[in-house]
């Protein structure tokens, strides 16, 4: 997977610096947010709109990750699951950072 950034105007109001200013999101705030994934998602979605279906997938894969990591459960993961996860990650990164992915 190769990602490139779409060219954007320096004056674009949709830049991460505008939506997530360092004065608000300093190192302490970011450290606090990243203690809880739900807090991160809630904070990001205050500033960035995602399709509901995408957020549902994000929550699904986060739950699956927790089962694998914290519960040490045996969870069957199929090739279509991996492909869908990849598509979801690419979609989120495209929305957040305007990345383009090579097929």
Image (spheres, helix red, strand yellow):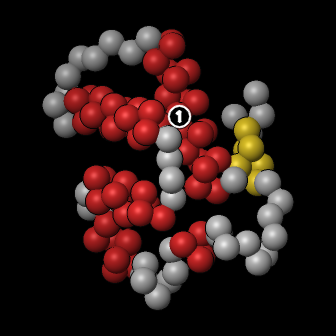
Q: Quadrant of residue 76?
A: top left
Q: Position of residue 19 (x, y in %)?
A: 54, 72
Q: Is residue 57 above or below residue 80?
A: below
Say which quadrant the N terminus sits in. Answer: top right
Q: Position of residue 90 (x, y in %)?
A: 60, 39
Q: How many marks?
A: 1
Q: Quadrant of residue 70?
A: top left
Q: Residue at x 79, y 54 (%)?
A: 6
How packed mark 1 is, by other alpha carbons closer than 10 Å (few <14, some 14-19, many 20 or more), is: some
Q: Residue furthest left?
A: 71
Whether residue 90 sits left or right of residue 75 in the image: it is: right
Residue 41 appearing in the image: yes
Q: Is residue 69 above or below residue 17?
A: above
Residue 69 appearing in the image: no
Whether residue 95 sits left or right of residue 64 in the image: it is: right
Q: Is residue 61 above or below residue 5?
A: above
Q: Position of residue 22 (x, y in %)?
A: 50, 83
Q: Quadrant of residue 69?
A: top left
Q: Residue at x 76, y 27 (%)?
A: 103
Q: Is residue 33 above or below residue 42?
A: below
Indicate the secondary structure of the residue bearing disc 1: helix
Q: Residue at x 76, y 78 (%)?
A: 11
Q: Position of residue 88 (x, y in %)?
A: 53, 34
Q: Which residue is mark 1?
A: 88
The residue nearer to you, when weighing 98 against 69, is: 98
Whether residue 42 sits left or right of residue 15 in the image: it is: left
């Amino acid at each position: 997977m190769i990602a490139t950034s779409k060219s954007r105007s320096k004056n674009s109001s949709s830049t991460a610096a505008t939506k997530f200013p360092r004065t608000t999101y300093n190192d302490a705030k970011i450290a606090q947010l990243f203690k809880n994934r739900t807090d991160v998602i809630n904070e990001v979605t205050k500033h960035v709109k995602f399709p509901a279906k995408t957020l549902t997938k994000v929550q699904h894969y986060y739950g699956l990750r927790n089962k694998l990591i914290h519960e040490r459960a045996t969870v069957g993961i199929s090739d279509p699951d991996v492909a869908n996860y990849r598509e979801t990650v690419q979609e989120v990164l495209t929305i957040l950072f305007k990345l383009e992915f090579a097929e």
